[in-house]
Image: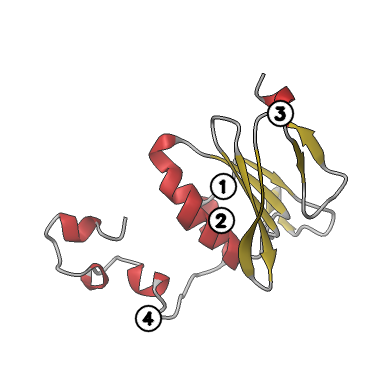
Amino acid sequence: MHLNPVRANMVEKPEEYKWSSYSMFIGEKEEKLINADVVLKYFKPDIFIMCEDAKTKGESFISSPKIIFEVVSKNYAQVDYITKLQVHQKFGVLEYNIVEQNGHIVQYALEDGVYGIKNTFHLGDIYISTIFSDLKIDLSYIYE
């Protein structure tokens, strides 16, 4: 994504493109996001879990979910694996699960503000949340 203006011969370096966030991604500029509400408007997860302490504005949530499941599509895999992962990490989503069409799940857990892979699940496994140990899902029921 950051190299698109370079590939289109619009600029020589990605950071030269006026609308690029490349400099923020590599840490050369401070990230100046307006607020979580605006950002999360464009990054709506496929499935998410909120709890009683969730903040709302009208019928909308304005606080981060505890857990997100993002189902990957071939056209947007890079967004799910890189961009959304970084956004959800920044806003403190405690567990981020990337669900592949073939039944594989990569589970990330937030520790000290940084995601690390905690587990991978495959067709036939029992998914267990890192946040809620009682949350268990038999993946064979989903992918039958």
Q: Which residue is mark 3?
A: 124
- Mark 4 is on which residue type? Glu
- Which of pointers 3 and 1 lies earlier in the amino acid sequence? 1
Where disc 3 sits, the SS reads: loop
Q: Estimate the spatial distance between the alpha carbons at disc 4 and disc 3, rounded to whole Å.
A: 44 Å
Q: Is residue 43 visible?
A: yes
Q: Which residue is mark 1?
A: 44
Where disc 4 sits, the SS reads: loop
Q: Which residue is mark 2?
A: 40
- Which of pointers 1 and 4 lies earlier in the amino acid sequence? 4
**Residue 7 as seen in the image, left or right of residue 129:** left
Q: For this rendering, which residue is in front, 114 or 4?
A: 114
- Mark 1 is on which residue type? Lys
- Dot 3 alpha-carbon crowd within 10 angstroms: few under 14, some 14 to 19, many 20 or more: some
Q: Estimate the spatial distance between the alpha carbons at disc 3 and disc 1, rounded to whole Å.
A: 28 Å
- Mark 3 is on which residue type? Gly
The answer to whether residue 53 is above or below residue 104 is: below
Q: Estimate the spatial distance between the alpha carbons at disc 2 and disc 1, rounded to whole Å.
A: 6 Å
Are the two marked residues, 2 and 1, in contact with CB atoms closer than 8 angstroms? yes
Q: Nearer the viewer, mark 2 or mark 3?
A: 3
Where disc 1 sits, the SS reads: loop
Q: For this rendering, which residue is in front, 49 or 128?
A: 128
- Dot 4 alpha-carbon crowd within 10 angstroms: few under 14, some 14 to 19, many 20 or more: few
- Dot 2 alpha-carbon crowd within 10 angstroms: few under 14, some 14 to 19, many 20 or more: some
